[in-house]
Image (cartoon, rainbow, N blue to C red):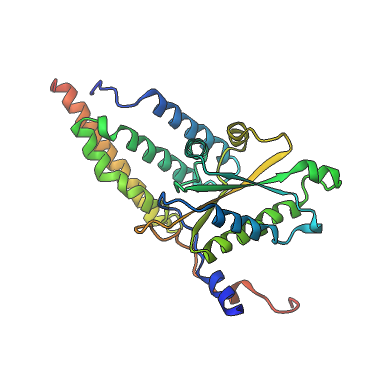
Amino acid sequence: MSEAVLQCIKTRRVVREMTDEPVTREQIEAILEAARWAPSGGNLRPNRYIVIEDAETRRLVRLVSPGMFQEAPVLILICTNMDVVAEQQVPPSDRALLIDVGTAAQTMMLAAHALGLASGPVTSYSKEAIKVILNLPAGYSPEMIICVGRRAPDARPGMRAFKRITWRDLTHWERFT
Amino acid sequence: MSENWVLKEDEAIELLALLISSARIQLDEPARYAPMRMLTATERLSSMILERSSDKSREFLQDNMERIPDMRMEMSDLPAYTEGLEALCRSVAECLLRHSQAKESGA
């Protein structure tokens, strides 16, 4: 069991080129169910998810998303519900809110991978344009889009790393001297 | 220069949306992303006009635009990225010259 989880973590990749093969409703729901179990600062659960399957809406979202190279059959927009944040008297600038977006995003991408699907995160879009296109409620702040689909057979490998690293390069044990 | 219309109104608006969105997000992104955003817009414009372009433009578009997705992935290799952009600049200059010469010759 644990080995399967580790393999899933190690073999997931960001995919920027996808086919238009549809993703089933069951698969989408499984991904959203996984996100529900992602850790959340203070168990506040401020994330809200908007699923976009409609072709024209996806096209419009892509037009204001210069960082979206995929033409994915499903987009999942992660929003922070700032009304929940205000109700709980959490400062809007609290970094935990963005950490929550990150934990949900990674959990969804791992779930997609476990289901045999490809995924890729996008943050390079106009938030204001997205709010207009999706008619988002005033309190919803669109923080990240997860593209979900199937990897194109001839998809290019991801962006080349600036430097090849191992976990050891990123880690320091105990106190600095 | 050819006076052919190569862009439809819807396509032009779509390109405007991409350029305006790129301008906004660039305020928050690393400066090195700016060329990538311009290249993305270039790629989109190219795909929009390819079918309606004259032979002398199409040659440039077909020869060069396929390189852009690969270039995006080379951002971490600055010398290769720079050379890729320089090569595109040379190619577009040659395309401009072909258009200019065609205009002068009345072709």
What residue do we see at 59% from left, 36% from top? A130
The quadrant holding residue B65 is top left
Would you place residue B93 above or below residue A17 in this image? above
On the picture, is B103 further left or further right than B66? Answer: left
Front residue of A8 and B28: A8
What residue do we see at 60% from left, 77% from top? A168
Residue A153 position within the rendered picture, expressed as x and y whole percent measured from the top left: 36, 59
Residue A59 position within the rendered picture, expressed as x and y whole percent measured from the top left: 47, 38
Would you place residue B89 above or below residue B99 in this image? below
What residue do we see at 83% from left, 48% from top? A90
On the picture, is A43 further left or further right than B4? Answer: right
- Residue A165 can be seen, yes or no: no
Residue A174 position within the rendered picture, expressed as x and y whole percent measured from the top left: 74, 79
Would you place residue A164 above or below residue A22 in this image? below
Q: How many labels does the image show?
A: 0
Quadrant in which the C terminus of chain A is drawn: bottom right
Residue A166 position within the rendered picture, expressed as x and y whole percent measured from the top left: 55, 74
On the picture, is A156 further left or further right than A60? Answer: left
Front residue of B39 and A89: A89
Would you place residue A107 above or below residue B50 in this image? below
- Residue A26 can be seen, yes or no: yes
What residue do we see at 85% from left, 47% from top? A88
Quadrant in which the N terminus of chain A is drawn: bottom right
Front residue of B31 and A100: A100
